Image (tube, rainbow, N blue to C red):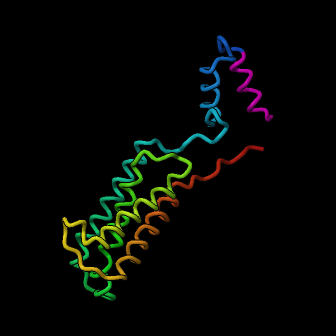
Amino acid sequence: MGFQDLTISAYFAIFSERPDTNHSRRLECAVRGKSMLNKPAETGSRDTKKVLDVLLVLLGIAVLILKKHYSGPLEEIIHSYAGNVSVSFAVFFITKQLPIYPKCKRLMTVCLTLAVVELFELLDGFGVMTNVYDPIDLAANAAGILLALAVDTALSIRPQPETMT
């Protein structure tokens, strides 16, 4: 136990009415930057994460809308498959909002998203939209989900706090 920990513990022992209460423990954990389970405190709030997810959904929709204006290298590929990649990307972040058990949230989000977009392809747009079947669309859908997973993982990595020695 370092000097800082001793100082914080002494502060709570002296100034807390009942240092053994749960309230006191929560306050101590908050000061030390840890959760009640001795994990680092979260750096972003749930609301911030939801706003970021909504922005990523809007990014996917923007790519879907703007792909028809693209002209340049690989134009035919962009026009054919960017829609699949961008919609799968957006659906991932929509699916992420479902109340899924936290320990397997990413895996379940990937599986549900893959099921939805692939069934959409295979069942001709669920009868709501006309869809031209192309086997490469299935791979483009998977690529969009993998891209979304990579972005989500990269955005959730928190830098490790520096320790004082």
Percent position (x, y) of residue 125?
Answer: 24, 69
Percent position (x, y) of residue 33?
Answer: 62, 37
139 over 6 or under it: above or below:
below
Answer left or right for 121 relative to 48.
left
Percent position (x, y) of residue 129?
Answer: 19, 68
Numbered label tally: 0
Q: Residue at x 72, y 17 (%)?
A: 13
| Front-lying residue, 81 or 156 | 81
Answer left or right for 94 relative to 1.
left
Answer left or right for 162 relative to 95.
right
Quadrant where the image shows the N terminus? top right
Percent position (x, y) of residue 115?
Answer: 39, 64
Considering every residue shown, the one lying at the far right of the view is 1
| Front-lying residue, 126 or 57 | 126
Answer left or right for 27 relative to 45.
right
Considering every residue shown, the one lying at the far top of the view is 17
7 in the magenta segment: yes
Q: Residue 164 occupies which quadrant of the picture?
A: top right
121 over 95 or under it: above or below:
below
| Front-lying residue, 88 or 162 | 88
Q: Residue at x 60, y 26 (%)?
A: 26
| Front-lying residue, 93 or 58 | 93
What range is drawn magenta here? 1-13
164 over 90 or under it: above or below:
above
Q: Residue at x 41, y 65 (%)?
A: 114
Question: Would you say the magenta stretch is mainly helix, strand or loop?
Answer: helix
62 over 159 or under it: above or below:
below
Q: Residue 137 occupies which quadrant of the picture?
A: bottom left
98 in the magenta segment: no
Q: Residue at x 36, y 82 (%)?
A: 135
Quadrant where the image shows the C terminus? top right
